[in-house]
Image: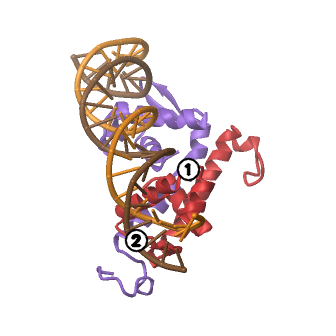
Chain colours: A red, B purple, C orange, D brown
Amino acid sequence: MEIKQLEYFVTAVDQGSLNRAAEQLYTTQPNVSKVIGALERELRVPLFERSNRGIRMTAQGELLYSHAASILKHSHIIRSMMGRQCARSSACPDTKAAC
Amino acid sequence: MEIKQLEYFVTAVDQGSLNRAAEQLYTTQPNVSKVIGALERELRVPLFERSNRGIRMTAQGELLYSHAASILKHSHIIRSMMGRQCARSSACPDTKAAC
DNA sequence: GGTAGTTACGAATTTCGTAACAATC
DNA sequence: GATTGTTACGAAATTCGTAACTACC
């Protein structure tokens, strides 16, 4: 399980379509299909029901979604913290705000 | 940034040594060194001070640690939830697999 | 035709272990 | 010598885009 896979999954859910997810992720639709397919095989769970009209989350997909979103949130926090080189808490007391 | 990188980092911190981390992660010590090095280059932040006596977290490493641990916790929850196919019986009312 | 998603193939990249290395005790 | 961590190299695995495919309207 990789962060990228969770990001692709969450984006597909939010966009409601693999095509739009691919566009937003700056990649191709076959790639999104394959990445999410690999995640489903790894977890041994179907995350979407596919049809020619689009995708719909399964119950297992809904279970995954909130945890995946939490992981993405933490990864964004890490990137913004490290990007700002904010080393010591004394240098930026209110860690929630811009540091 | 990948979950595996965070797992290697957290394990190295917990074990206090790249050698012991490699052993626990069922890989080699050069691999641990390289994976963590790649994470440091990606975040543009030193996470450890190295010496011939071992490693010591930097202030930036300490900032990363708690968020990395949270991500790992969520990933473990996901794996255990999906491994059992569902958390609540209502989540998957008609699955063939054991629920 | 147009839109949805999947599978096939191949080049480019990445991964990971072995071996060699540097430095300290 | 024993221990720490790093760098080099090469085979194996993975990634990602193009092309070809199925299915529905």
Q: Residue at x 36, y 75 (%)?
A: B85
Q: Residues within 10 Å of mark 2 (few under 14, many from 20)?
A: some
Which picture quadrant has residue D11?
top left
| Secondary structure found at label 1 | loop
A18 is higher (above) or lower (below) than B32: below
- Mark 2 or mark 1, which has the lower sequence index? 1
User: With A11 as the anchor, is B18 left or right in this view?
Assistant: left
Q: Residue drawn 52% across and 38% down? A: B39
Name the image quarter holding residue B35. Answer: top left
From the top left corner, tell me how far across and down residue A29 is, in percent.
Answer: 52, 57
- Between marks 2 and 1 in the image, the one whose residue lies nearer the viewer: 1
- Amino acid type at image mark 1: Thr
Residue labelled with disc 1:
A27
Secondary element under disc 2, as helix, strand or loop, is loop
**Mark 1, chain letter?**
A
**Gap between marks 2 and 1 measured at Cα:** 22 Å
Callout 2: residue from which chain? A
Residue B27 as seen in the image, left or right of residue D15: left
- Note whether residue B96 is visible: yes
Total marks placed: 2
Q: Quadrant of the C terminus of chain B?
A: bottom left
Q: Which residue bears the numbered disc 2? A: A46
Position of residue B82 relative to residue B9, above or below, is below
Who is closer to the viewer here, B14 or A73? A73
Q: Is residue B49 above or below residue A40?
A: above
The residue lying at 53 percent from left, 58 percent from top is A8
Question: Residue B32 has which mark?
Answer: none
**Rendering coords of residue C14 (x, y %):** 43, 37
Type of amino acid under label 2? Pro
